[in-house]
Amino acid sequence: MAGVNPRQRLLDAAIEHIAERGISDLSLRELAAAIGSSHRMLIHHFGGREGLLVAVVQEVETRQRGLMDDVMPDPSAAPGDAMRAWWRHISDERLWPNERLFFELYGQALQGRPGTTELLDGIVDAWLEPAATLLTQMGLSRAEGEAAARLGIAVTRGLLLDLLATRDRARVDAAMDIHIAAMEALLRSRA
């Protein structure tokens, strides 16, 4: 890992450990010991437990956005196929620990819990640009693309929360299929 700064090494190790173990009752000292560091070093780099958890969520979100091109099928594929590929990826059970962390911290940030409110910076906007760009490439105007992107982000997050809460894959997938069909109809109407 030569060339990777100490903060990034700690963050990468924390992401890996949290994905395997979760964060319920995880203390900063326990996490530090598990990743071969000290709680003081984590405080130095992240300001505390909440700051570290926010950094974990932000990094995971950044990595997910970076995977959009890899997950989406060939650009000539039907838009619905691209949306289904993304849903299969983002709703994969292996990502659930990160999704649970996202929703837990999102709720804390909305409540104004100290150390978590930074998470709200760009929580929607960071996804809007890449999603709106894809939708405008599929035929929507810029304004429609931005509105449809915002709707897609909200539906995806809502259905992920539903999936985590109910574990009812069949019904949640059916709901996403209805959303994708509506998006496909919108795109066809603009073609």
Image: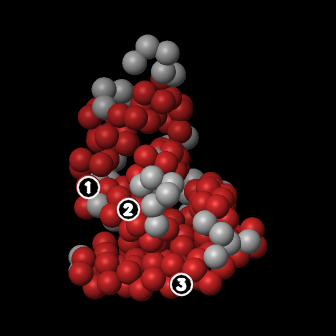
Q: Residue 30: horizontal and vertical position, in percent? A: 29, 40
Q: Residue at x 65, y 69 (%)?
A: 139
Taking depth in this image into account, of 45 and 158 the one nearest to the observer is 158
| Type of amino acid at the residue the image marks with label 1 | Arg
**In the displayed structure image, the side of residue 121 where residue 82 appears, left or right:** left
Q: Which quarter shows the C terminus?
A: bottom right
**Real-space Cα separation, disc 3 to disc 1, in angstroms:** 31 Å
User: Could you tell me which secondary element the residue under label 1 belongs to?
Assistant: helix
> Would residue 101 be visible to someone looking at this image?
no
Q: Position of residue 110 (x, y in %)?
A: 58, 70
Report how far apart the C-alphas of labels 1 and 2 lie in the structure.
16 Å
Q: Which residue is mark 1?
A: 94
Residue at x-position 51% and y-position 22% = 5
The residue carrying mark 2 is 85
**Residue drawn at the location 31% of the way across and 31% of the way down:** 35
Closer to the N terminus: mark 3 or mark 2?
2
Q: Position of residue 61 (x, y in %)?
A: 49, 52
Which of the labelled discs sits on residue 185, or is there none? 3
- The image quadrant where one finds the N terminus is top left
Q: Which mark is residue 169?
A: none
Q: Secondary structure at mark 2?
A: helix
Asked whether 91 or 28 is in front, the reply is 91
Pointer 3 with pointer 1, Cβ within 8 A: no
Q: Amino acid at mark 2?
A: Ala
Whether residue 139 appears in this view of the structure is yes
Q: Residue at x 41, y 86 (%)?
A: 178
Please say if the residues under marks 3 and 2 sit with CB atoms less than 8 Å apart.
Answer: no
